[in-house]
Image (tube, rainbow, N blue to C red):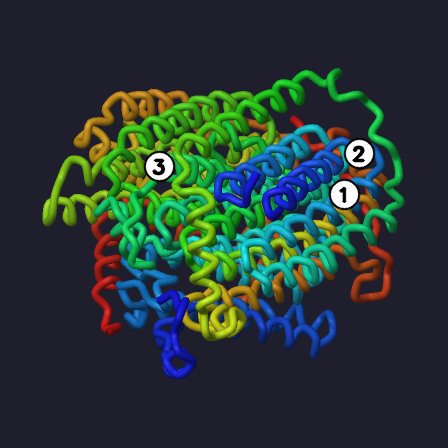
Amino acid sequence: MELTFEANLLLSALLFTIGILGVMWKRNAISLFMSVELMLNAANLAFVAFAYELGLLSGGILVLFIMTVAAAEAGVGLAIFISLFRGKHHIRVDEHDSLHG
Amino acid sequence: MNPINKEIQDIVAYVPDISLASLAPFLILLLGGIVCLVADAASDKKGSRRILPPIAGVTLIAAIASFFLGLVPSRPFVEGAFYGDFFAQICCIVCLFAGLLMVILAPRLIERRNIPSGEFYTLIIFASLGMCLLAMSNELLTAFISLEIMSLSLYVLTGIDRRSGRAAEAAFKYFILGAFASALLVFGMAFLYGATQTTRLDLMGQVLASGYNTLITGETVAVNPVWIYLGFTLVFAGLCFKLTLAPFHMWAPDVYQGANTPTAMMIATGSKVAAFAFLIHLVTALSFWEPFAGSAAFIIGLVAIVSMIWGNLAALVQKDFKRMMAYSSVAHTGYMMVGVLVIVSLPALLQGDDLATATATVRQAIALYLGGYTIMNVLAFGLAYHLDGESNMEAYRGLFWRNPGAAFGMGIAMFSLVGIGFTPPTIGFMGKFYLFKEGVQYGFTAVVVIAVLASVVSAFYYLGLVTRMFMREPETGDGAVALCGTGAHQCGLFTSASFTRMYLIGAGILIFVLGLLPWLFIGVGQHLASGIAP
Amino acid sequence: MAGLVYTLLFLITVAFGLGVLLNRNTVSSAMCLVGVMFCIAVNYLMMRQEFVALIQILVYAGAIMVVFLFVIMMLNLRERETTPWYLRNARFWGGALAIVFFFVLAAGIQIFAVSGGTKATAAKEAAIAARETPEVILLATLMLTEYIAPFLLTSVLLLVAVIGAIVMARRKDEDGNEILIEEEVA
């Protein structure tokens, strides 16, 4: 296929869906968060695809900022995972349920 | 201004539209946060626990006061990134008040749980800053970054008590679901950007009203409906997490329960009000597009009804106070969605001046509800914080006989939260009254009827708490409320306990005052909007 | 020729993406994510956003994923995901729903896409080639004029992130005691 707008957007949608599947299926918190990063990458690709299609330059800027935000979020998130791991010695998502009831 | 082919001289000569005065509240908060951090680094543990609360409190009060100087303009400023209309300013002030209570409650928490105080106060200030920025955002990217500032601060505040396993788990769950919601939000923003060629909400409204973008690149491109629907759905899904709307509210009970109570209060009030303000801005911009009203109203109405029903039913069976309040906040956000429904459908029904006055009226009603909701929750959480075994509903048994003041305050909060029927003089009732009146006026009678029925159900668990407080339990002997004046708790004028008492009594009084005279609140808002800013 | 390259890129990106999803070893999953990021950077290059592609590689693949790998190895998460996915019902149905969502999205894109195919791309290439000022200068201008508010807010965000990460991850508190999770009071 050629480098077309549809193809780019299709790729973005595909990666986003794979990310959502990962968020639902993965039991390990870090794998889950990596799937969220995949979703963010897909969104970035969508931004640049739209910008290229419309002839705008702001898509690239938006991507820079979203990347920065993702980096900040990853920093805090991994710190939270580390903090929980030190106490409970595992970060499997479905086995933390001391808060129910 | 998208400089695809500009000359370098033109580029260098362009001066962006920023004035420091218009950013006054934000700058005050930023400065306060940095001062807190530096002050903490410069002093030892005891010293910082003493000097930081005043610094943080003064910062928040100064930020609130700076709004009344009329410096924040009512038009898009800072290159269209922010928009300071009265609704946004009121939401900002409400968030700052929530932050102020958290600062007042903080010393006791820090003392009990040995929490690092410098970072705690700094994060409170930054969380409030993020909420303020989100409430006033006019641009998708600014809103996203503000949302993340607020969220990251709240994630860390949830888990800041490193010695509590439940706090660590609450922070963990909050972070994972919040990150997922952010990713949905960003993907939705990509579609909205692609459809309208701009990220600014005011320009988006113009583009959607005319149906064609000739705005940015000079070419005529039709607005693609699929992108708008997709974009809005994804952005709304992301915001539903923050607003704890069903079916995305699952994190709220666990997080409210596991987090320390002051942080739970911030999440319940501030983050919701800020996200709601942004939703209103977004929906107002998108509603200029004719086909939007019908389909969006359907999704929003559906989510609202499910939230009201699910929230109230689930709250009935909770044994933990904070979980109950979490589900109650789910229900309340459902009620608030009636306002969003009205705003979505207004441009389709009215034109011109009628549209302007109607929009203003609905926004006033929503602002009143948000303000009232915050005051009620602040009172409830603030009182709950001071009970030993703070979350356990059993601790409320016979509270009236141990500490009548606290029981009275909690009773006021609970009555106000019910908000229907025999509770007219409270702001809970007034807020619902004005909001539901608008809803019925613009054709959403069915949703309003469901909301009223759901409120009737909610009376069971709110008033259930009240009756429990009046039960006789003479021998239990635990859980005295540690506010001033009771027994061994005599305290001086400027201690945290005395400020707490003043603040909570003030909140209780406000519930009645604003309930009897709701136009006071609106009058404050109008004064803000008609400020001297250029 | 360009078409062939792009097709390969598409397939490799999706393959890496599936690798992130289906890998049982967390480290392999992370490396596949790095692969996805590189492929997306190449995609940006093909769309003539050279600066963004560079930043993607430097920041995303080069910094964020490195932190991920540090944490994975620090927590020694080489464990395998043991339960097969088709035995967990709610996840299965959620996954099926996500796949349906993808098809809806793809159909929407096919039916409603705006572009005119290869002709439009050639016109854009010409416009980009005719640009006089370098792309980086244009990006910088945009960032400091139209997007200056996000620029300033990002600095606040990074400050918050640094404070948060340190508060959550440090081992010793102010008095020098080690921070441990204590027994919960019921």
Question: Residue B342: which quarter of the image?
Answer: top left
Q: Are marks 2 and 1 in contact (CB under 8 Å)?
A: yes
Q: Chain of mark 2?
A: C
Say left or right for B249 vs B257: left
Sooner in the amino-acid sequence: mark 2 or mark 1? 2
Name, please, the residue furthest toward the front.
Answer: C1
User: Which residue shows up at 27% across the image and 29% down it?
Assistant: B294
Question: Residue B442: which quarter of the image?
Answer: top left
Residue under label 2: C23
What amino acid does circle 3 point to? Met
Residue under label 1: C32
Q: CA distance from mark 2 to mark 1?
A: 9 Å
Which numbered marker is on residue B336? 3
**SS assignment at label 2:** loop
User: Which residue shows up at 54% across the image and 29% down it?
Assistant: C102
Residue A88, position as x, y percentages in the image: 83, 40
Is residue B59 at all visible to an observer of this figure? Answer: yes
Report the front residue among B64 and B127: B127
Answer few, some or many: residues within 10 Å of disc 1's Cα (few below 14, many 20 plus, some between 14 and 19): many
Question: Residue B86: which quarter of the image?
Answer: bottom left
What amino acid does circle 2 point to? Asn
